[in-house]
Amino acid sequence: MASIQQSGNQSRGQWSGRMGFILAAAGSAIGLGNIWRFPYSVAEGGGGLFVLIYLFFVLAIGLPVLLAELSLGRESRRNPVGAFKALIPGKMWPYVGGLGVLTGAGILAFYSVIAGWTLGYLGKAVSGTLVQAQDGETSGEIFNSFVADPFWPILLSGLFLLLTLFVVRGGVSKGIERATTLLMPALFVLLIAMAIRAVSLQGGMDGLIYLFTPDWSKLSLNVVMGALGQALFSLSLGMGAMITYGSYVSKRENLWKSGIFIATADTGIALLAGLIIFPTLFFANADPLAGPGLVFVVLPTIFNQMPLGTVFAGAFFSLLAIAALTSTVSLLEVVVAYFVDEKGWKRNQAAVAVSGFCFFLAVPSALAFGAAPAFSGGEGSILPFNLDFLTLNNNIWGNYSLSIGAFLICIGVAWVWGVPRFLAALEDGGDRTFPMPGREVTGFLVKIVCPLAVLIVLIFIVVTGQYF
Ligand code: TRP
């Protein structure tokens, strides 16, 4: 079945098979979050300490919330709003799904800007410009001049949204599965080759030490919040993307195995990206605090250390753009599924309207990073401070909104729907039980540990006022 044109229960599409769903969900999870956001968050969070806390959150919060979302979706066969309406009694719950829909649009609006940068860098790789990026300094200049003029960043983020629109219009299995089946494994192989080269560069060892040695003096609320947000963001959790994808999964599927596979693949790719970026960063003597520009400054320098560097660079930025596309597709799909299921819009119309709206929202983020002296707080600025929409959106939607969403999803699933029903839905469809004590642990994590941990972090942030 290839189409999800109609709303309602029986006529929803399904993934074409076991691999279709797993690859599409992994495609949603694996994206710029792993290769762009993870490394610069690590750098801002002081290296190994961030990695350690992030890994803890993936296990203690990410995996349980992933299983909760997938179960909710498969059992209800609806978009996030409909899923709550169908399964969780109480007037307030559909709003949790609504927050997710809003968050999807919010994330898409800055994510498409970075995705546009990957297209820009693909162009630079193919045209040979990146050959000049021999060290962190020249590479940084190339990046700065790229984002300083808003023309290309805005145009390319629009182009990326257009690509996303085409895939989403085509329906679930046709569009999304095909893009993922071949290209995700290709990205994986390419990253391994790059990691091997990076680690053997001069200074490579310093990078590894930085990545894996926790410096406890760096411990702060912001680091913890960043790691929590990153664990959720990277696994596409907290806004219903996995509820939506779960709604297309058949009962034959073993959700335990799928969840574990998705979380492992996603975390593996993030660590692999770290194994490439940090050794190369030390080798090229680049600035670790380049923020959202980090990957775009660091990576071009490694290609110049590889045989057939231009070919590698072109392949890498193509695959990165495709990885980003399978993620933006899942973001747009959530919002579109909502308008189709709940508001009766035509799929085509919903996709066009939502992506157009997101393009509009993306422009301030495209201007934010270097391209808008008027808002920079510096010379010639009309504001006394730097208004960086990209970072602002990234924090609001990508950290806070997802955390609040994950908290509410856990409460709804474990406390209202109930752990027994959740576990039954998780294992629905025959012999799907997970060896003890997996079930008990999962129930406990979703009911107690996840909501409590998120709540504690959020309360600390509110009390201390350390929002960013
Ligand atoms: N997980 C994706 C990444 O790492 C981004 C993404 C796609 C996402 N869908 C999402 C993040 C839903 C949060 C929620 O690039």
Image (cartoon, helix red, strand yellow):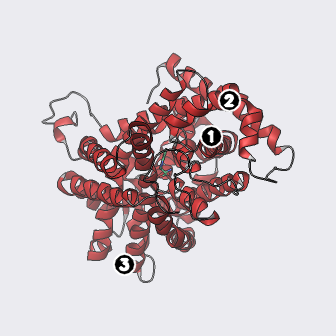
State how far apart marks 2 and 1 are (Cα): 9 Å
Q: Nearer the viewer, residue 264 or 147?
A: 264
First in sequence: mark 3 vs mark 1 = 1
User: In the displayed image of the protein, which residue is found farthest to the front?
Assistant: 10
Q: Is mark 3 on a helix, strand or loop?
A: helix
Q: Does the CB distance between marks 3 and 2 fall below 8 Å?
A: no
Q: What's the amino acid at mark 3? A: Thr
**Residue at mark 3:** 310
Q: Is mark 1 on a helix, strand or loop?
A: helix
Q: Indicate which disc residue 72 carries.
A: 1
State how far apart marks 3 and 1 are (Cα): 45 Å
**Residue at mark 2:** 417
* Image: 391 above or below 21: above
In the image: residue 239, left or right of residue 309: right
* Image: 450 above or below 204: above
Q: Where is residue 296 in the image (x, y as percent from the top left)?
A: 37, 59
User: Measuring 32% from the left and 63% from the top, which residue is drawn there?
Assistant: 119
First in sequence: mark 3 vs mark 2 = 3
